Each structure stands twice: as C-alpha cells, then as structure tokens.
Amino acid sequence: MSSGYSSLDEELEDFFFTAKTTFFKSAQSRAPAKNVTKTAEEEKPKAPTTQEIEQIINSYNAKVTNCFVMKLNEDGTYTGFIKVHLKLRRPVTVPAGIRPQSIYDALKEVNLADMTEKRTSFYLPLDAVKQLHISSTTTVSEVIQGLLKKFMVVDNPQKFALFKEMQRDGQVLFQKLSLTEYPLYLRLLAGPDTDVLSFVLKENETGEVEWDAFSIPELQNFLMILDREEKDKIQQVQKKYSKFKQRLEETLKETGGKPG
C-alpha cells in the first residue's frame, strides 16, 4: 500500500540557511546519562481491534481544532497527518543547481536529484516543520525517506533518525523510534495535542561518526566547513583578547602606571 504522502506543507521558505554550527559532537561522559534519549525497544501494547480503532479515531477527531482529522478506510487502515520538526545540526547534501519542484514533478513523482550528479551542502533551516499525510501502515523508515525526498536531500537515510518528543514532570523527553514503528498510530494514541507528543528528525547519533558512510564530496565539504569554522573561532579569540589588551592599556594610562 502506498504510504500516501501529500504535498500539504506548512509555510516554509524555499531556501536553505548557512549556520554557525560545529560539525563534531561534543565528547560525552561514559557515566550513565540523566538524559532522556533512549531507543524504543520497550514492551508494546496489544494492537486494538478495528472497532476499538474506530472509537479512538472518533475521540481523536472530536479534539481536532483544524482540518487535520483522521479517516478510517474500509479495509481497517486509516490515514491522517503528522507534523515533523527537523532539528539537524549538520549540513545535508542536496543537488546543485536544481530548479524548485513544480506541481507536475510532485504529481508525477519526478526525482529532481537524479537530474544531476553535482552536489552541494547546506544547513537546513533551524527547526523547520513539515506536515505529512500518511497511512497507518507508513513506517518510520518511510517517513524519513519521504522527508528527505521533500527537501531533495540525497544523504543516506541511515544517517537520520525519527524521535518522539514528550513532556513529563517539566522535562522534555526524546525517545528514538525503531524503523518499523508506525508514527500515525502513536499520534492517534497520544491525541492531536503536540505538547503531549511531537515528532523530531535528528541525526542518527551512534556515539562515533561513521566516516565510511560519507562520500568523497561530502567529506570535502565537511573539511571546508571545518576550515571556515576554525578561522571564525580564531578571529573571535583574537578580537576578544585584543579588546582585553586595550582595556588594560587604558587602565594603565589612567593610573599613570603607578601600582596600587
């Protein structure tokens, strides 16, 4: 069954931003983290019956304040919408010199990335949001691939992971979802309130950077980014100490160079 992605996007400018972002991940302590990110390998509840699903959908739709309701199909599957926040700290690889996707391209499922072998790297807008129309049979893996396709990102999907974000006892909790999870089912159980549950696309952190997963052009782009960041840091440090030196010299002049 088709995953049923629609082109219903929230308002988002069709360009990318560069950002002052450090590529390397900060060193982590080996001590058990008090953090909240974990893999979703816990016990799963028993799947509800079609009748129970219908009742849950009716309850869900009654709480919806916009047009993003869920619809039950005759075969027992259902469709609906999920909103995904993109919180990517590293640049992504996109085709170079590609025109924006047209309605024709979307309807005919034309992959513009296949039209050129030229690649370039950009930082996606910080905390960009995409609205996806999916089916109850759409997996996390398909959601990730669908998001990358919408942004024309040609990086390996394995470099990314989908998390569910929750709030509990005043804390923001992130839980990594397995590739076989069904996001729409999680949305249905949690209800339409995004404060209760929201989805976030992030880098698939494994503790170590898997350099073999990157192509030669990607690695070259990373080196260019690191070189630029290094120069920026050097300038910042030089500027900081230059101001500090200037203040010391001014203080010495005011005191006439006398101690005390």
Image (tube, rainbow, N blue to C red):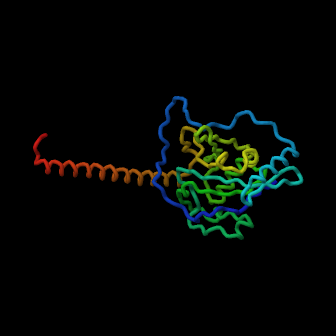
Specify whether 45 is left or right of 219.
right
Q: Residue at x 49, y 55 (%)?
A: 221
Comparing 241 with 220, the one in front is 241
**Which quadrant does the C terminus fall into?**
top left
Residue sitting at the far top: 31
Position of residue 210 relative to residue 102, above or below, is: above
Comparing 11 with 145, the one in front is 11
Q: Residue at x 64, y 65 (%)?
A: 115
Position of residue 134 relative to residue 49, above or below, is: below
Specify whether 18 is left or right of 80.
left
Q: What count of labels does the image hold? A: 0
Residue 37 spot, x, y in % from top left: 60, 38
Residue 57 spot, x, y in % from top left: 81, 50
Position of residue 208 relative to residue 255, above or below, is: above
Comparing 118 with 69, the one in front is 69
Specify whether 14 is left or right of 191.
left
Residue 48 spot, x, y in % from top left: 83, 41
Position of residue 206 relative to residue 131, above or below, is: above
**Image quadrant in which you'd find residue 12:** bottom right
Q: Residue at x 56, y 51 (%)?
A: 88
Q: Residue at x 49, y 32 (%)?
A: 29
Residue 196 spot, x, y in % from top left: 67, 45
Comparing 174 with 221, the one in front is 174
